[in-house]
Image: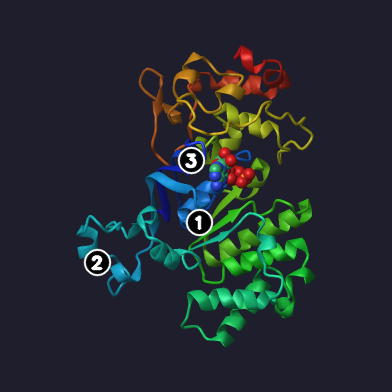
């Protein structure tokens, strides 16, 4: 049973000159119960947009152009006494509810999504540690989050839960009476994680949970997230530009570039059998867990603006392996492990498979070898590709 199933999700931002920023294009992925799924890629590739769109928190000029976001929940008004969707609701084409108990969040109105946000899906935004209100005690802010979403809970129970949640993320319960300025950066981040867990969500979205923290604190935050997951069975959708952080905590991940998923699969597949030039370049630019001494090589050039992009592969202008075909159309997702009877790559829509968007999938061995050499990335000028 899948908790979240994102199908062909495309998100746009309308901008002043009349063009649209294609922040996410035909994105597919799924998250299973209790799983940690990662969205990784350089700044501006659309990770935050994607995460915010799931719970309708896009900026005012952002909108879902197309796609579906099926989530394992049924709103009370559409559920029977067991919490399952009523047959009349499933049969109603105007209701975004499936027989398997999933609801398409993309079709909900703002009141309906408010019932899901925090209670079923909690989001820890980027720079969350600055999100704590300086004039309220930290504990009271958690209490408020509980009471807002669970009116039946008493203030006393909520206080008890707030203290308990703080303890679970490694903060002394008595510090509930402190103000945010009395907390270190790492403690603030953990308090925000506690707040996100206040209503027992099924999915926790953590946007760059360790950025701006030093390495030791980063490790502790990752450990806290893993511990919470083990204890509560919550699924985590984690976003980071740092592929080595992802390696530590994710079961599966999607590597994004320019609003597109370039490669997706289990973490060990992405690391041990990397199948996309962009992922290879990204790996070169971060110290990996296995080889901390390796030279770091960043990918020359900058990501595209995404304003009305052309049809070609989004990565081709920075890709040392780009060929003619890459200019004509962005590649589909190919299955990395299987080929057809003639040995040719096959397209795949299987969200659990290891897939890559690269036409040169048949030459992977050579590409992997070449990608290790710094000169592969630095010798060629953009014009020569
Ligand atoms: N409100 C907006 N209006 C127009 N363009 C936007 C808006 N918000 C984001 N974008 C653009 O959408 C694209 C995706 O941005 P997004 O913030 O989702 O990427 P990201 O991978 O999360 O990067 P970061 O980690 O820096 O937040 C970028 O090109 C960005 O400039």
Asked if the residue at label 1 sits under 8 Å from ligand 1, the reply is: no
Quarter location, residue 231: bottom right
Q: What element carries label 2?
A: loop
Q: Where is residue 348 in the image (x, y as percent from the top left)?
A: 39, 33
**Residue behind mark 3:** 24
Asked if the residue at label 3 sits under 8 Å from ligand 1, the reply is: yes
Crowding at mark 3 (Cα within 10 Å: few <14, some 14-19, many 20+): many
Are circles 1 and 2 on residues that touch, CB within 8 Å?
no
- The image shows residue 353, relative to residue 343, as above or below, that is below
* 3 or 2: tag closer to the N-terminus: 3
Q: If the picture is divided into quarters, which one holds ligand 1?
A: top right
Q: Name the residue rendered at 62%, 14% in the picture.
A: 383
Between the C-alphas of marks 3 and 2, the distance is 33 Å
- Residue 1 visible? The answer is no
The colour mode here is rainbow
Q: Name the residue rendered at 52%, 15% in the picture.
A: 323
- Residue 359 visible? The answer is yes
Q: Name the residue rendered at 46%, 83% in the picture.
A: 152
| Left or right: 334, with 384 as reference point | left
* 1 or 2: tag closer to the N-terminus: 1
Are circles 3 and 2 on residues that touch, CB within 8 Å?
no
Q: Position of residue 137 (x, y in %)?
A: 70, 77
Q: In which quarter of the image is the C terminus?
A: top right
* Pick the front one: 12 or 353: 12
* Pick the front one: 82 or 128: 128
| Left or right: 341, with 62 as reference point | left
Crowding at mark 1 (Cα within 10 Å: few <14, some 14-19, many 20+): some
- The image shows residue 250, relative to residue 383, as above or below, that is below
Name the mark on residue 57: 1
Q: Which of marks 3 and 2 is in front?
A: 3
């Amino acid at each position: 049973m899948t908790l979240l199933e994102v199908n062909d999700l495309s998100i746009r931002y309308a901008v002043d000159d009349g063009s649209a920023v294609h922040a996410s294009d035909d994105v597919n992925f799924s998250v299973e119960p209790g799983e940690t799924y990662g969205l990784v890629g350089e700044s501006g590739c659309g990770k935050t947009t994607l995460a915010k769109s799931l719970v309708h928190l896009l900026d005012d000029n952002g909108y879902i152009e197309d796609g579906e976001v099926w989530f394992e929940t049924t709103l009370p008004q559409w559920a029977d006494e067991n919490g399952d969707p009523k047959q009349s609701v499933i049969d109603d084409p105007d209701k975004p509810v499936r027989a398997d108990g999933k609801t398409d969040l993309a079709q909900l109105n703002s009141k309906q999504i408010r019932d899901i946000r925090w209670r079923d899906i909690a989001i820890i935004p980027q720079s969350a540690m600055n999100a704590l209100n300086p004039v309220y005690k930290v504990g009271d802010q958690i209490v408020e989050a509980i009471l807002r979403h669970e009116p039946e809970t008493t203030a006393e129970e909520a206080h008890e839960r707030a203290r308990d949640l703080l303890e679970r993320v490694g903060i002394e319960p008595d510090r509930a009476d402190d103000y945010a300025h009395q907390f270190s950066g790492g403690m603030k981040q953990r308090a925000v994680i506690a707040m996100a867990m206040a209503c027992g969500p099924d999915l926790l979205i953590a946007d760059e949970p360790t950025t701006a923290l030093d390495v030791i604190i980063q490790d502790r935050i990752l450990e806290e997230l893993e511990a919470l997951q083990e204890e509560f069975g919550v699924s985590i959708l984690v976003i980071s530009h740092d592929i080595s952080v992802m390696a530590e905590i994710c079961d599966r991940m999607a590597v994004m570039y320019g609003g597109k998923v370039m490669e997706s699969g289990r973490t060990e597949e992405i690391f041990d059998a990397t199948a996309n030039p962009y992922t290879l370049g990204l790996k070169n630019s971060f110290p990996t867990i296995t080889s901390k001494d390796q030279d770091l090589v960043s990918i020359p050039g900058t990501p595209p603006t995404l304003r009305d992009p052309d049809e070609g592969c989004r990565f081709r202008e920075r890709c040392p392996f780009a060929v003619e075909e890459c200019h004509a159309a962005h590649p589909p997702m190919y299955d990395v492990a299987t080929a057809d009877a003639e040995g040719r790559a096959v397209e795949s829509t299987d969200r659990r498979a290891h897939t890559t968007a690269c036409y040169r999938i048949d030459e992977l061995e050579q590409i992997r070898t070449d990608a290790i050499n710094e000169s592969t990335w630095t010798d060629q000028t953009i014009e020569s590709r």
